[in-house]
Amino acid sequence: MNSIPRAQPMANSIFPLFLFFLFFHFPSLSPAKLRPDFYSNSCPQAESIVRSVMHKALIREPRSVASVMRFQFHDCFVNGCDASMLLDDTPTMLGEKLSLSNINSLRSYEVVDEVKEALEKVCPGIVSCADIIIMASRDAVALTGGPDWIVRLGRLDSLTASQEDADQIMPSPRANATSLIDLFSKYNLSVKDLVSLSGSHSIGKGRCFSIMFRLYNQSGTGRPDPAIEPRFREELFKQCPHGVDENVTLNLDSTPYIFDNQYFKDLVGGRGLLNSDETLYTFYETRRYVRWFSKDQSAFFKAFVEGMLKMGDLQSGRPGEVRRNCRVANGQSVII
Ligand code: HEM
């Protein structure tokens, strides 16, 4: 099981004492042991319910499953896979929904609500929102033509969320390969994991907002990123002209509804949308994986599944619960 880096290490002298009290008062603090059959007695229909709601979402709005799949990344990197990113703000807590990377960007929260409602009807209080994110992300990939795999379950939902942590941790679309390698390594995720997991951009869309600097002022030069292939650059200029509504969206790869290795072929051709994508091809340490995955889709699928399982194991060890409503901790009242 992967544990995640802590923001502020405690002074060595009081740490053992602190741990003792924490464990004593909160037995659920020790990270849950995750296993595939976690709900096999308590809610045997859990996996089929999640799959069927995701299937309906795909038919209703094809992009929505990509949007839900992104949740796994934004959840697991910020204090572990604990559905903290699903919590709405409260008068006393600024949640993660309005953090820099999430505001006007994360979407389709209602699909998770639908999954949760369907599960609560059949097995009330049993399946955590954190596990829903993990199952739904896997289903998004499987339903769009990607690999299918067995997920480990048994996570708890957080009692709180942190906008500050999300702001500090989540990478920008401007990020370069070195900073991404560094970030992923803090979670014991390798260079190969970084490249394969970035292959999630095989489905879904991004906004002009995320590429304006790249198109018009890369690294403060007042010019576009030279790594963008010229014809693709012209297309991007047309779709995101100066003064455009920056919420206009573009495909992340040329087959945005199919989970395949086209994303890597596009990177090799200089047609990656985000700087954080194309940098994986321009940087020598990541390039070999991009090349490999562009030629061998099954190698990509295998590496992607490994990466998703590793990322899904990130846990904070903090106390948790099974939320009844994914947007609100159980003790809090729902604000309408
Ligand atoms: C490596 C670092 C990453 C960066 C810098 C990054 C950044 C972004 C950005 C900027 C967008 C478009 C957002 C917008 O313009 O509103 C996006 C979309 C997306 N990201 Fe990432 N991402 C990264 C890794 C990942 C990972 C690991 C996953 C999942 C495993 C993921 C899944 C997605 C998906 C599916 C979308 C499309 C969502 C939609 O259509 O609503 N990303 N990402």
Image (cartoon, rainbow, N blue to C red):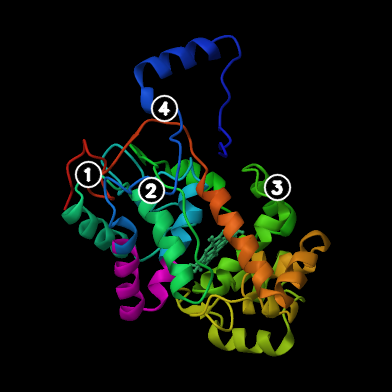
Q: Is residue 53 magenta?
A: yes
Sequence-first disc among 2 and 3: 2
Q: Is residue 105 visible?
A: no
Badge 3 is on which residue?
A: 182
Q: Tell me which corner region of the image, top left, top right, bottom left or bottom right, holds residue 210.
A: bottom right
Secondary structure found at label 3: helix
The residue that mark 1 highlights is 125
**In the image, farthest residue toward the front:** 41
On whether residue 95 falls in the magenta region, the answer is: no
Residue in the picture at 16% in, 55% down:
121
Q: Earlier in the sequence, mark 3 or mark 4?
A: 4
| Three-letter amino acid code of the residue under disc 3 | Asp
What is the distance, in whole Å, between disc 3 and disc 1 at their CAs? 38 Å
Viewer-nearest of discs 3 and 1:
1
Above or below, 108 relative to 161: below
Mark 2 is surrounded, within 10 Å at the Cα level, by few (under 14), some (14 to 19) or many (20 or more) other residues, namely many
In this picture, which residue range is highlighted in magenta?
49-67
